[in-house]
Image: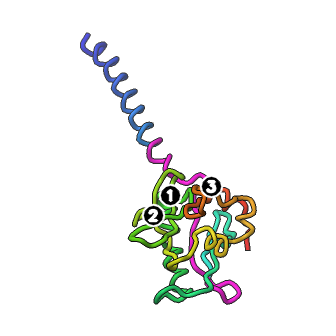
Amino acid sequence: MMYKLLNPMLRKAARLCNMALLTVFAATTTNQPSYANNMKFFCEESKGIPTTFARREDGRKMPIIRWVSSYSFLTPLKRCQEVSRRFQKSYDNGNLKTIITGTINEQSVICAVVSTNDACTNATVLFTLKRGDNGKTVLERLLDRRGLAGSVIHNQSSDDSQVYIDFETYLSNLKPE
């Protein structure tokens, strides 16, 4: 008799455990970027210019940013290496969905965030702009134009001070090098 009572209770407990595991699994997988499971960002010279690349799962690499000018004490190569590392970190954290402009400590910055409703923080900064630079102009100059052709830079304000790019659309429009 005791066995018959325990058996339904054990089955119910097993079902609850399975539901809990499915919930945990779903919660851990939803923050992953949808455009690729194993995208890798890295810095490599292309035609003598330090370039931030994204390598897709199939091994093909796509140019994201070509670094042609120095900033502060950083050479284009050092800046490429640092920003490529930040792209990878943002991607790994599931934050590289949208690229936006913002301001931190009175400096204009470019950030990787989940949505256009998010704000730039120290943790989401991809790179800092030179004083007086317009974020939209810088993004149009730095980002690969083939990717921008299909993913328009959207203004969130009338003065171009805050813009955003759907990074997944941008990546899908890039052609491998």
Q: Position of residue 78 (x, y in %)?
A: 51, 85
Q: Secondary structure at mark 1?
A: strand
CB of mark 3 within 8 Å of CB of mark 1?
Answer: no
Q: Secondary structure at mark 3?
A: loop
- CA gap between label 2 and label 1 equals 7 Å
| Residue 5 seen in the figure | yes
Residue at the image position 59 percent from the left and 62 percent from the top: 159
Q: Quadrant of the C terminus?
A: bottom right
Whichever of labels 2 and 1 marks the residue nearer the N terminus, that label is 1
Vertical position of residue 135 compared to residue 76: above or below: above
- 10 Å crowding of disc 2: few (<14), some (14-19), many (20+): many
The residue segment tinted magenta is: 26-50
Name the image quarter holding residue 155. Answer: bottom right
Residue 31 shown left or right of residue 60 in the figure: left
Q: Which residue is mark 1?
A: 113
- 10 Å crowding of disc 1: few (<14), some (14-19), many (20+): many
- Identity of the residue furthest to the top in this view: 1
Q: Amino acid at mark 1?
A: Val
Vertical position of residue 139 compared to residue 46: above or below: above
Whichever of labels 2 and 3 marks the residue nearer the N terminus, that label is 3
- CA gap between label 3 and label 1 equals 15 Å
Residue at the image position 62 percent from the left and 67 percent from the top: 136
- In the picture, the disc for residue 124 is 2
CB of mark 2 within 8 Å of CB of mark 1?
Answer: yes
Q: Which residue is mark 3?
A: 35
Q: Position of residue 171 (x, y in %)?
A: 66, 62
Q: Position of residue 72 (x, y in %)?
A: 47, 87
Q: Amino acid at mark 2?
A: Thr
Vertical position of residue 33 compared to residue 85: above or below: above
| Residue 167 seen in the figure | no
